[in-house]
Amino acid sequence: MLITLDHLRRYAVARSLFKPTTLKAAFQRLGFVQADPIRSPARAQDLILRHRAKDYHAGDLERLYPKLEIEEDFFLAYGFMTKSLQALMHPRSDVDVPAEGPRTWPAARKKLAQLVLGFVRERREVHPREVDDHFSHGSVRNYWGGFSSATTHLLAAMHYRGMLRIVRRESGIRIYAIHEHGPAPADAAERRARIDALVDAAVHIYAPLPSGCLADLIRRLRFAVPQWRGTLKEALQRAKQRLAHARIDGVDWYWPSQENAARCELQDTVRLLTPFDPVVWDRDRFEMLWGWPYRFEAYVPALKRRLGYYALPLLYGDRVIGWGNLRVEGKQLKSDFGYVMHRPRDRFFKRELDAELERIKAFLAVA
């Protein structure tokens, strides 16, 4: 069957917004959920999971994290992932967190990290405050030019390096423990297999992908495997050979070879998505599929915003037709909407939009 852009648009929505299941099963199906600290009206990870996990409420991920057999770590960005996905990336080289660039640790930092590691091993689980009280690290200038706790800085770097894991959070603060990883790949063939598995995991989350977006996705794996960043160009060529492919209007599109992009069932319902949802995550793909440029404007000066501080893409069936801005005031949900063309006038859309707002109220536990 000839694949069209209409097929891919429907496929992109249907494959990602699968029938809600248990939270653990949703994680196994996704593999990775991106995190973001902004709460508007909830954090990105919660907004992503509410569409895919039954009876999900804001904060469930943090509350249930110790029982889910998942990890916090960097993949394409920072987020939550299955243990099997994380195992493909470690052990990492001794470089700094992505925001600081791929800098190798100096000898003094390695020595300090070993002292902290011994302290954590002795305590089993530690709050950053305990480490700071014991070592009195002070503060350091961070990537954005401000000052942050040297303890927090070092613990984050040790976590990224794979020396520590996050066992839970207390009021949003990471609680750390020792993390032991398996051995590095024994040879080049095993390393290629790991990299290809990481590429396939990324494609599984964000397919279908035009050629340029696929290349960018694989380049972003430098955050996951800084020790193998020099091999990612070869990984892109291998991916293009094994993925399903179609050329539409002069653009090459790719998706998992075992999936049929031409056959998807989709409900004509309304959903408000976080800017980090897999359906809308890639801005270039977004514009190709839906014909208008969506921009995340939380860091844009207020007077220059066109959509809003944290505008949620508004999905109606397989079309993103506008955006919504939600806020909670006095335990009540307030909403404002904008549309690319005009608001649909059919009663079905109004009913479905009202139903989505009721789902969000239940998710947030507000009126």
Image: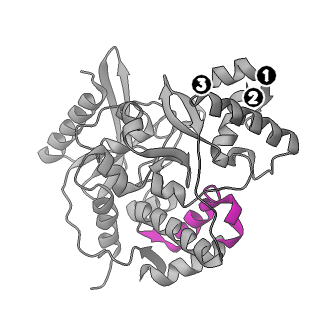
- Inter-mark Cα distance, 2 to 1: 6 Å
Identify whether 333 is placed above or below 278. above
Is 187 positioned to the left or the right of 72 in the image? right
Q: Amino acid at mark 2?
A: Ala
Callouts 2 and 3 close, C-beta under 8 Å: no
The residue labelled by disc 1 is 138
Q: Is residue 311 visible?
A: no
Queried whether the magenta region covers residue 39, the answer comes back as: no
User: In the displayed structure, would residue 212 be above or below residue 28?
Assistant: below
Judged by its main secondary structure, the magenta piece is helix
Badge 3 density bin: few <14, some 14–19, many ≥20, Cα 10 Å = some
For the point 64% across and 60% down, the residue is 225
Residue underneath mark 2: 150
Quadrant of the drawing holding the N terminus: bottom left
**Going by the picture, which residue comes out furthest to the top?**
330
Q: Nearer the viewer, residue 293 or 26?
A: 26
Task: Give the spatial CA distance, label 2 vs label 3.
Answer: 14 Å
Please name the amino acid that badge 3 sits on: His
Of labels 2 and 3, earlier in sequence is 3
Residue 314 relative to residue 164: left or right: left
What residue do we see at 19% from left, 36% from top?
A: 354
Residue 74 in the image: above or below residue 327:
below
Q: CA distance from mark 1 to mark 3?
A: 16 Å
Please provide the residue range marked out in magenta.
208-231
Residue placed most toward the observer, 13 or 308: 13
Label 3, on which residue?
A: 127
Q: Earlier in the sequence, mark 1 or mark 3?
A: 3
219 magenta-colored:
yes
Q: Residues within 10 Å of mark 1 (few under 14, many from 20)?
A: few
Q: Are marks 2 and 1 in contact (CB under 8 Å)?
A: yes
